[in-house]
Amino acid sequence: MGNNKELLLIHPSMKPVSLTEAVNVMLPPQFYTLKKEVLPLRYAYQAKKIAPSLFDGLLEGGDYEYMVWKEDEAWVFLAYDIQKITTFLESKSFALEHVSKLFFAQQSVDLFDKPILFGEDDALVSLDGMVVVVPRGALSDEDGPSPVFDNHFTPKKGIVLSGAYGSVLSLKQASMLSAIFILFALMFFVEGSRYSDDSKAGEAKIQELLSANPALQSTYTRESIASKYKAIDRTERKKRELVKMVSGMIFKGVTLSALEIDTKSYKIHFTCKDAQVVKRLNQLAAKNKLKTSAVSGSHDLKIEGTL
């Protein structure tokens, strides 16, 4: 972390500002919606692809974009409406060309271990791994003095407001940047082709799982911060655990042909490329305490059981 530009922590009741140079802006929880999920995903692009379904029914009307990253074993999904953010900034006299990058408080969650005073009546603090707004009256003397909020809270990854710098770059500079980006794109394309099989397999895996078990999406979307401490239904929890196990058993040479889950039982059908793949899949099934049966005349495997 760290940045030579001033980092401003904004809040809904702040007074208008007067800026003469570029600054970075950190947004508190009022400007985004957050979810954490432990999912069997390897890449951020896979997480970003399913992000909209996780927030289904949780967001107010608007045009939302998503940021994802990994925290320990969980994926963090953050939804934000850039139009609402820029409208607020402009209402506080921010000139968008003076906003270098936008950051979210959750990106610096580890630095909010002590409350940071926020506005006149509130504070920001990390609780259970999430940055939340709490009334100052809820703070105790044991919390000690509030740390100074400064540039060392700046995360590594930020959001650049598209169009904010439209008049800054000349046509010549824009052309040079375009040429550089094209060159990098070609380099990434060549390098990425080496991993295309694994990437496509990973993307297909996510689509297969979501298509085969639509109820999984609704399970995710109905969770919220207010209900995270409530007990999770035993059957639904087992369904979720089963889907995670199945996703971990899909690798190159394995195709998930069928996945059926109801309230009492499940049926899984894998199509395997050859005997070697079958052997490895059997090992993974045994590790997950799942019983397999061979499909006569093929390299296919079936797994059946009760929840």
Image (tube, grey):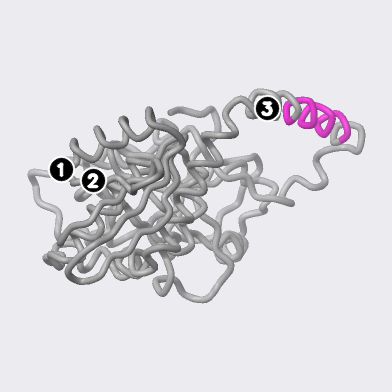
Q: Residue at x 48, y 55 (%)?
A: 207
Where residue 95 appears, as percent x and y from the top left, is 67, 53
Amino acid carrying label 1: it is: Lys
Magenta segment: does it hold 299? no
Of pointers 3 and 1, the one earlier in the residue sequence: 3
In the rendered view, does 152 fall on the left or right side of 232? right
Residue topped by disc 1: 289
Residue topped by disc 3: 188
Q: Residue at x 66, y 43 (%)?
A: 20
Q: Nearer the viewer, residue 14 or 57?
A: 57
Crowd tier of the residue under label 2, counting other residues whose Cα lies within 10 Å: few below 14, some 14–19, many 20 or above: many
Where residue 107 appears, as percent x and y from the top left, is 39, 42
User: In front of the other: label 2 or label 1?
Assistant: 2
Crowd tier of the residue under label 1, counting other residues whose Cα lies within 10 Å: few below 14, some 14–19, many 20 or above: few
Q: Which mark is residue 147?
A: none
Amino acid carrying label 2: it is: Thr
Q: Residue at x 55, y 58 (%)?
A: 65
Classify mark 2: helix, strand or loop.
Answer: strand
Residue 98, above or below 195: below
The residue at the far front in this view is 297
Q: Nearer the viewer, residue 129 or 15?
A: 129
Residue topped by disc 2: 292
Crowd tier of the residue under label 3, counting other residues whose Cα lies within 10 Å: few below 14, some 14–19, many 20 or above: few
Picture quadrant of residue 78? bottom left
Magenta range = 175-185
